Image (cartoon, coloured by chain):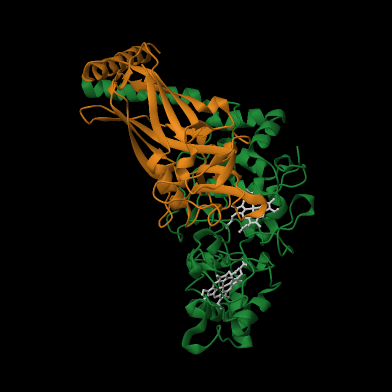
Amino acid sequence: MLIGLLTIGLIANTGCKKNDSKLLQTPITFVAPSNFPTPIYQFTDNAVSQAGFDLGHRLFYENALSIDNSTNCGSCHQQFAAFANLDHKVSHGVNNCFGTRNAPTLFNLVWQPNFMWDGGVHHIELSALNALTNPCEMANSLDNIVKTLNKKTPYPTLFKNAFGSTEINSQRIFKALTQFTGMMVSANSAYDKYIRKEKGGEFTNDELAGYNLFKQKCNSCHTEPLFTDNTFRSNGLDLIPKDAGRETITLAVADFGTFRVPSLRNIALSSPYMHNGQFATLVDVLKHYNSGVQNHANLDAKLKENGVLGIPLSVIEQQQIISFLNTLTDNEFIHDPKFAELPQL
Amino acid sequence: MKPISIFKSLAFAALVCTILSCKKNNNEFTGSGKVNLEFDNMVGNQKLELDTGAYTNANGDDFKITTFKYRICNLTFNKADGSKTLIPESYLLIDAADEQTTLQTLDNVPAGDYVSMDFVIGVDSLRNFAGAQIGALDPAKGMYWSWNTGYIFVMLEGSSSKSTAKDNMLMFHVGGAKAPNNTVRKITLPLPAGGLRVRSNAKPEIHLKVDAAAMFKGTSIINFATLNGFHGGVNAPIIANNYAMGMFSVDHIHN
């Protein structure tokens, strides 16, 4: 009898919840690719729905989030560049302001333990905060964004569809943006198909040779399948780095001039390269690893093994590695209409 | 349709039963009440006057205060028998410049007689590293670092003729919940004789004195010529250790 009552209590309860948010409608299930580990962000307290995702999609491309109605997330994170910023060494925000760092690619964010080149942001839901409020990016305040969206149709309705009421607050904005950016998964490159033994996953001899070299020379930092081990290291760009990098966050001297190892997925699309955008092409990058590495105080041990600076690679080997890096391009992802740019409302 | 409504009313009855039995379990008093907290911002024995008040720290350095804000959380009321009642979701942000924030109300405090209270100065590490929050923890309310995400726990800004910083500024932004610069501090305050009496039909008020000058003495006397500001980092725990010693005290309670 007691158990019976409890069960009924539960049913009644669920019924209540559904009523509160009956507009949450179609849930979207996040499915991790079979060759990927378990994601770090599990959408706990932020279950993805079609309405929430659509709202996040809208917000991502909404100029009204910037102080002068000129800039949206997509201005610096372009789909065709795997959501990096093509041709921009450093980001270009409102009022013609140039930032100090290169806009990184955005995908597979739910596997990232921390964000930004220096790892200063520790939660995906807060990864948009800096861009929204940084005077050199969108230069807005959260209060003002909430006010603006409240006045702009159809946002109150879109928030109601997504969260059950028309209330707009920063938490809902962040959660909706996260439903969108968190669902950006890139896992259908030729490389993935090769690994999963799917059609389209055939490697040429050069690609295969490049893959084998990659596993020996690069994989210790750009670790498969995400192509980063999420640590902070120096790959010797400068003798004395201009940007303190990770040290800004930890204040540890050993972190001076170290940056998060970036993923190399879609790397052929996201030039220029490095935190400061100092290399325009992958040829330049491979040349750097072969002969340009600077022996700065915190240069990673991997890049000065046996007293040799960098990673010696013949020109042919460099080309083979580039052939392999090209297999990391995920054309389905960059053409996926789910993530495509939206016209302003 | 019909069976469902019967089920629902049965479930409701079950729920009511549970709540009632809950109440009965709680020794003498039943129900819960509200508790008001009033924060009287001070500098030593003087009332804090932003911008205009002229003060002297324990080192003898003159100073003025333009901003004084702080966060406290996880308020817990303790009974004489040692039992503790944590008030869920008690995250408060007090800004000396915003009168409304200096009077805060806790709802649903279980009725009873309490002899002391605990709280954390700052934001507990769990919430500090969680995702987007609302209420006092909404980053829209400020006291938040977006480039090194986390809450600012205590913020004091002002000036001192002794400060070697630009424009003689003082800029203490205390925060950080990670070793070795963890500044989360939990304190216990005894309540005056008679304690706090929470009842469903009363609204007791606790008057807290918050002494901004306590940031600069206690475990280390601060010399504004050598320490006049930071945003987190190695010096933040020095100030946190200071303010954990004596920034907060309960002055009196109206029961």
Which residue is the extreme one toward the right?
A96
Which residue is the extreme one toward the front?
B60
Q: Is residue A43 visible?
A: no
Task: State which quarter of the image contains the N terminus of chain A.
Answer: top left
Nearer the observer, B13 or A340:
B13
x and y percentages locating residue A169 in the rendered image = 59, 33
Rendered shade, chain B: orange
Nearer the observer, A304 or A158:
A304
| Left or right of B66 on screen, residue B44 | left
x and y percentages locating residue A265 in the rendered image = 58, 65
Task: State which quarter of the image contains the C terminus of chain A.
Answer: top right
Residue shown at the point (37%, 11%) measured from the top left: B2
* Count of labels in the image: 0
| Left or right of B6 on screen, residue A40 | right
Chain identifier, green in the render: A
- Quarter of the image holding residue A166? top right
Q: Is residue B184 visible?
A: yes
| Left or right of A186 on screen, residue B193 | left
Nearer the observer, A237 or A268:
A237
x and y percentages locating residue A91 in the rendered image = 71, 58
Vertical relation: A113 (above or below) B106: below
x and y percentages locating residue B254 in the rendered image = 38, 17
Nearer the observer, A338 or B214:
B214
Vertical relation: B67 (above or below) A23: below
Residue shown at the point (65%, 49%) measured from the top left: A131
